[in-house]
Image (cartoon, helix red, strand yellow):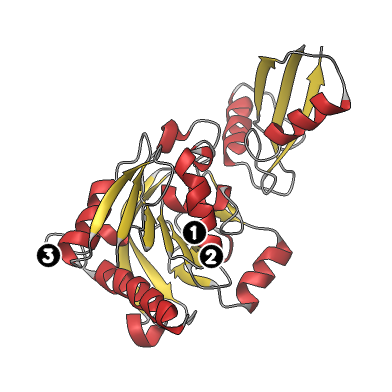
Amino acid sequence: MKIAVIQFPGSNCDRDAYHAFFGVFNQPTRLFWHKRPSLAGAECVVLPGGFSYGDYLRCGAIARFSPIMNSIIEFANNGGPVLGICNGFQILCEAGLLPGALVRNEGMEFVCESAKLNVEDSMDYFNQGSLGETIDIPIAHGEGNYRIDDDGLADLEANNQVLFRYANNPNGSISNIAGIRNKEGNVFGMMPHPERAVEEIHPSRDGIGVIKAFLKSQMARQQKA
Amino acid sequence: MKVTVFVTPKKTVLDPQGAAVGHAMEHLNVKPSSDVRVGKTIEFELEGSDTPELRAQLEKICDGLLSNPVIEDYRYELA
């Protein structure tokens, strides 16, 4: 799968994501500057973590209006696979590609640790059978407190859109939500960093399973289409 | 025309920043009788006068860029 890792001014996990997709998974991967007008044939988009535009206004609020975002919104609405990690998740929510929003952590603390996540039975490849009941993935964020209104939350639950929940909620997220997908199953957002859990030297290698699940689920979707 | 946009967290959304500021007020022996909510003010000039078209332009930038309707409310003043 041809992967585009988008670089915004202030992205800082772009090269980690590049390394995970190219170095570990051997997928043809390119870094795309946010001012590019098109995705140039990419088959999968990754929005990496960081502090795009210094988190000015709100996390992800300005990146959402970057030139490449129009192409990404169109790509996602046509079923193209998109994964947003940390700041990338915030950008996807701002862009309306995922429901809800991420606000300041309860307790105001920036949390940087390895977090235990309970895996939810969400869809093919994103379930306990594929990933195990719990996984360890690093988190590093100040604004990962997921918020959504009651109807939105009921929708998420009814459609099994929650991918992961924190075993020990570090930020006040509603229903311990750490990651979600859209209803269609092609747009994914998560605060934890799977790309930081793919090497021996990392605290865990559980990120390999998450990225594999993402790639496999999307390859399966495209074969069906 | 001078535009001032006020953005505040929705009443239903927890505001950890406001809560922290509220605690600091108590350290100064002032006890707020409600939640403290921290928002932001955005000021700028726009050419033109107070017309429905100008207000439509303002709504366009307030709703999505300057504020996120999921978590924030906004209002603006024209002068």
Residue A43 placed where, x, y %? 37, 63
Labels 3 & 1 near each other (Cβ < 8 A): no
> Please, what is the three-letter code of the amino acid marked with disc 1?
Phe
For label 3, the crowd category at 10 Å Cα-Cα, with few meaning under 14, some 14 to 19 and many 20 or more, is: few
For label 1, the crowd category at 10 Å Cα-Cα, with few meaning under 14, some 14 to 19 and many 20 or more, is: some
> Please, what is the three-letter code of the amino acid marked with disc 3?
Glu
Determine the CA span between mark 3 and mark 1.
Answer: 34 Å
- Are dots 2 and 3 on a single chain? yes
Labels 2 & 1 near each other (Cβ < 8 A): yes
Position of A136 with respect to A146 (left or right) is: left
- Are dots 3 and 1 on a single chain? yes
- Give the residue pinned by disc 2: A78
Q: What is the chain letter for disc 2?
A: A
Determine the CA span between mark 2 and mark 3.
Answer: 37 Å
> Please, what is the three-letter code of the amino acid marked with disc 2?
Asn
Compared with residue B35, is residue A225 higher up or lower down, i.e. above or below?
below
Residue A33 placed where, x, y %? 34, 40
Of callouts 3 and 1, which one flags the residue occurring earlier in the amino acid sequence? 1
**Looking at the rendered structure, which numbered label has been put on residue A200?**
3
Q: Secondary structure at mark 1?
A: helix
For label 2, the crowd category at 10 Å Cα-Cα, with few meaning under 14, some 14 to 19 and many 20 or more, is: few
Residue at the outermost left position: A200
Q: What is the chain letter for disc 3?
A: A
| Quarter residue B31 falls in | top right
Q: Secondary structure at mark 2?
A: loop
- Give the residue pinned by disc 1: A75
Residue B1 appears in the picture as rendered: yes
Q: What is the chain letter for disc 1?
A: A
